[in-house]
Image: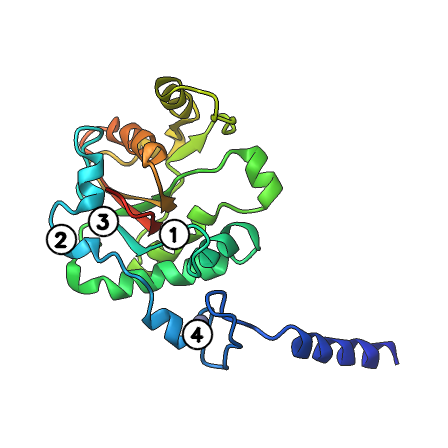
Amino acid sequence: MIRTIKQWLGAATDVVLPRVCPVCGQALDGDEKWLCRKCLADLPRTRYEDVDFNTMEQHFAGKVPIERATAYFFYEKDAPYASVLHDIKYHSTPLMGQWLAARAVHDMAASHFFDSIDVVTAVPLHRSKLAHRGYNQSEYLARGIAGELNIPYLETLKAIRPHSTQTHKGALERWQNIQDNYALNHKNADQLAGKHILLVDDVITTGSTLTVCASLLKGIPGVNVSLFTLAAARLE
Ligand SMILES: [Zn+2]
């Protein structure tokens, strides 16, 4: 009897909570995985990977030497596509991120952006945040890319301090603060000499975290670093 009620409740939950597209809110059909066909087709792609010395690459010029940089799509705060980022970060759907990152590899194939990458890594999350959220969304993105490219994912960096509130700090102090948050994970980093590493994060806004993390990786002899984020604020 209880089993029957559970089965009935299970079916009822499906009816009450159908799978919906996070962008437009429409119910997904059986063939649609995380986003509906229309929202995927309308994804506001940056197509940075098709442009030499693109806007994102220019953003890092003079800060840290990188090979290439791209983001899959543009996002604006409170715009429909921002809900994708919000969901993969806070709503326990990191697998949507993994799926989208793998899709990005597929979509960007013609640009050869990923061709010379040897290993994929992610901007790390401090263990206190990891304990709270349960996962690092950027790791899921990095694993999605590594899986699609059939190359290793490695934890090359660690977050040694939690982010502190920075609203009242000056630019220099803020920078110093971010710099002190990360370190190389020597257990894995020491085997990376001479490799081309793809550093992955969910979004790029100011780029300071990516600059700090890329600079640490550049401390390994002969390493080249490229950057990938799932989304980018419009950088100017
Ligand atoms: Zn949709």
Q: Is mark 2 within 8 Å of ligand 1?
A: no
> As drawn, is 50 to the left or to the right of 4?
left
User: Identity of the amino acid at label 2?
Assistant: Val
Q: Secondary structure at mark 4?
A: loop
Q: Quadrant of the N terminus?
A: bottom right
Residue 89 placement (x, y as % from top left): 51, 50
Q: Earlier in the sequence, mark 2 or mark 4?
A: 4
Q: Secondary structure at mark 2?
A: loop
Q: Quadrant of the C terminus?
A: top left
Q: Is residue 113 visible?
A: no
| Viewer-side residue, 82 vs 124 | 82
Residue found 38% across the figure and 19% down from its top? 176
**Label 4 belongs to which residue?**
36
Instruction: Say few, some or many: other residues with alpha carbon within 10 Å of mark 2 (under 14 / 14 to 19 / 20 or more).
Output: few
Corner quadrant of residue 210: top left
Residue found 54% across the figure and 47% down from its top? 135
Q: Is mark 3 within 8 Å of ligand 1?
A: no
Q: Earlier in the sequence, mark 4 or mark 1?
A: 4
| Viewer-side residue, 52 vs 141 | 52
Q: Is residue 154 visible?
A: yes
User: Identity of the amino acid at label 4?
Assistant: Cys
The reply to whether the C-beta atoms of the residues labelled 3 and 1 are less than 8 Å apart is no
Q: CA distance from mark 2 to mark 3?
A: 18 Å
Instruction: Say few, some or many: other residues with alpha carbon within 10 Å of mark 4 (under 14 / 14 to 19 / 20 or more).
Output: many
**Label 2 belongs to which residue?**
51
Q: CA distance from mark 4 to mark 1?
A: 20 Å
The reply to whether the C-beta atoms of the residues labelled 2 and 3 are less than 8 Å apart is no
